Image (tube, rainbow, N blue to C red):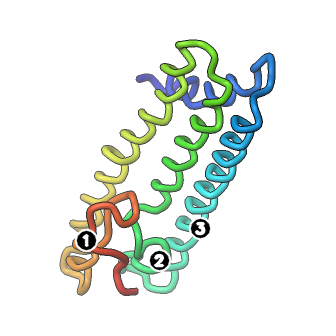
Amino acid sequence: MSTPLLYVALFFPTFVMATAAAGTTAAGAAVSGGAIAVMALGLVVETVADFQKSWSKEAAPGTFAKGGLYAWSRHPNFFGEVVFWTASVVAAVPFFHAWYHWVVAPLGAYVMYFIVAKGAAKKLDMRQNEKYKDEPGYAEYLEKVPLLVPLVGKKGPAAS
C-alpha cells in the first residue's frame, strides 16, 4: 500500500464520523466515546514511552530501556500507536452505513499494525539484539517482555 493510500485509510474512520448525516444511537455514542478515550490512552502510552526511553538513555547511556512501560513491552510507543489507530476504527463503527465503510476503515489500522509489529518493531529488536546481546539482564528481558502487546506470550514485567 502506498503512503498516500495508507493515510487515506487511516483518516477514513474520522471522515465517516464527520460526514454521517444523522447521529447515532445512545449505545453508538457510548461506543464512540469509549473508543475515543482509548485513542487518548494510546497517545498517552506512546508519549510516555518516548519520554521514558529518552530519560533512560540520558540516565544510563549505552544501556537498554527496561523500566516503566518498557518493563511491560519492548516497544510500548509502537503499542500505543497501534492502540490509537485501532480505537479510531472502533469509534467510527456506529456510523458505518455502507459496505465500503467496513472494508476501508479497518484497512488503515490493519496495515499500521503490520508496519509497526512486523516491520519497525522487529527491525528495531534486531538492532537492539546486536547492540545489547552481551549486556547483563538483556537475555532475561527478551524472555520475559513481549515485543509489542503487554503480557501476550510472555511471563510478565521484567524487574527494573
Give the CA separation, mark 1 to mark 3: 21 Å
* x then y, percent, for residue 28: 70, 35
Report the side of 63 relative to 98 (left or right): left
Q: How far apart are the two marked residues, 3 and 2, measured between alpha carbons?
A: 14 Å
Q: Which residue is drawn at 71% across and 43% down?
A: 30
In this rendered view, identify the residue nearer to me: 13 or 48. 13
Quadrant location of the C terminus in the rendered image: bottom left
| Side (left or right) of 114 relative to 95 | left
**The residue under label 1 is which amino acid type?**
Leu
**In the foreground, 116 or 86:** 86
Q: Mark 1 points at which residue?
A: 142
- Residue displayed at 42% across by 33% down: 111
Residue that numbered label 3 is attached to? 48
Q: Distance between the residues labelled 1 and 2?
A: 18 Å
Q: What element carries label 2?
A: helix
Q: Which amino acid does label 2 sit on?
A: Lys
| Residue closer to the observer: 142 or 97 | 97
Upstream in the sequence, badge 1 or badge 2?
A: 2
Q: Quadrant of the N terminus?
A: top left
Q: In the displayed structure, does residue 20 sit left or right of residue 47?
A: right
Q: Mark 2 points at which residue?
A: 57
The reply to whether discs 1 and 2 touch (Cβ–Cβ < 8 Å) is no
Please, which residue is most extreme toward the right here? 22
Query: First in sequence: mark 1 or mark 3?
Result: 3
Q: For residue 20, what is the image quadrant?
A: top right
Q: Which amino acid does label 3 sit on?
A: Val
Q: What element carries label 1?
A: helix
**In the rendered picture of this protein, how many numbered marks are placed on residues?**
3
SS of the residue under disc 3: helix
Q: Quadrant of residue 26?
A: top right
Q: In which quarter of the image is residue 94?
A: top right
